[in-house]
Amino acid sequence: MHILAIETTCDETAAAVIAEDRSVLSSAIASQEEVHVRFQGVVPELAARSHLEKITPIIGQAIEEAGIDPVADLEAIAVATEPGLPGSLMVGLAAAKALCVAWRKPLIAINHIQAHVYACQLGRAKSIFPCAGFVVSGGHTNLYHCKSANNWSYLGGTIDDAVGEAFDKVGVMLGLPYPGGPELSRLAEAGDPKAYDLPRPLLSDKSTLNMSFSGLKTAVRYKLVGTGKQDFSQLELDDATRANVAASFQQAAVDVVVGKAMMALEQTGLKRLCVGGGVAANSMLRFRLQEMAAKQAAELIVAPLELCTDNAAMGAIAWEKVESGDYADMDIDIQPGLLRGE
Ligand SMILES: Nc1ncnc2c1ncn2[C@@H]1O[C@H](COP(=O)(O)OP(=O)(O)OP(=O)(O)O)[C@@H](O)[C@H]1O
Ligand SMILES: [Mg+2]
């Protein structure tokens, strides 16, 4: 049997078909990047409308590529109901409910943040639990003690901007297209990470696993334009300066993420760290996490590159809910603001 998983939490419309052994038969994604690029960020209303256009074709594509008969072959239909943009979440949930009624299937509600960590499970025979789970994405930077797939406790996280959001905002300052993270990391390759002295908020505070990235982003702004101007389009930065800013920012952000991941392992005594979310695609972060885990004699699992940013294949976590009988009622609502994902 198979699960159809649906993902519409932010600006990717995605559907996947996943077998019980967690192998992914199909994973279809429609990105909305071109809808939002001129606004340098996601516009919620446009995101919801774009999901509405794409949701049925994407589900159809996932079913067709998997080569299954949905009525005969589906065990359940899973959908991410939390957290995310309200309008976006509603489109996915409405589609999932309608298909459950039409095909007479049970509904499973997925927490999108937990799914980002579960991306680490795909392609592995051995369970990733227990582990320290770390989501580094566009909306979250959260650390969890994951005792099992269904038992998570929040350890700490950002108290302001998410790390991906900081990458994107600094990307705007450097004139990079949205989302700035991937471009910024490419630009950083040519830069000197020591060129600018930037803050690492809360990094040396061992009493907390909380993080902060808003001050780091503002520090970059002050270095570039001082405290007055806001219009980055007027900035005329030479290539060397742009690369140095990108490298210095990336170094500071990665220092904080790696430092807090290390503290989470030390404080929990866990020997496995699973990292997911869009920023986990960052090659410098992957390298530095590997170095840190080796020193801690811990196992590091980072989500496969194609499963770091939003996708529905990580909805494979729904199989854990099938196994524990955790089905959703058909009158379930969305939970947009569940930032800690507990
Ligand atoms: N190579 C990279 N380096 C740094 N950041 C990256 C890289 N690739 C992607 N990102 C960042 O990842 C973020 C998108 O990740 P993701 O799709 O997981 O976030 P989201 O779904 O918007 O947020 P959430 O999952 O918290 O709701 C963006 O901020 C993007 O800039
Ligand atoms: Mg996401």
Image (cartoon, rainbow, N blue to C red):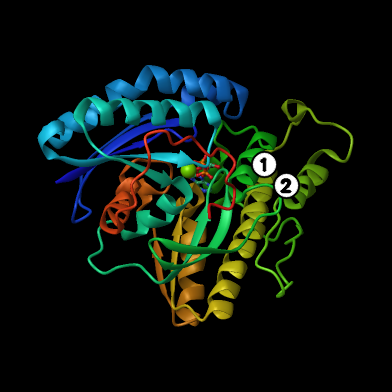
* Marked residue nearer the N-terminal end (2 or 1): 1
The residue carrying mark 1 is: 170
Q: Which residue is mark 2?
A: 217
Q: Residue furthest right?
A: 228
Tell me whether circle 2 and circle 1 mark residues in contact (CB < 8 Å). Answer: yes
Figure check: 311 above or below 232: below
Residue nearest the viewer, comparing 126 with 178: 126
Closer to the camera in the image, 207 or 256? 207
Where residue 175 appears, x then y in whole percent?
Answer: 64, 32
| Residue drawn at (78%, 45%) of the image | 218
Q: Secondary structure at mark 2?
A: helix
Give x and y (percent) for residue 227.
88, 40
Residue type pointed to by label 2? Lys
Tag 1: amino acid: Val
* Quadrant assignment, res 30: top left
Question: Quadrant of residue 149 in the image?
Answer: bottom left
Q: Which one is nearer the viewer's eye here, 316 or 304?
A: 316
How far is the residue under mark 2 from the one under mark 1?
Answer: 6 Å
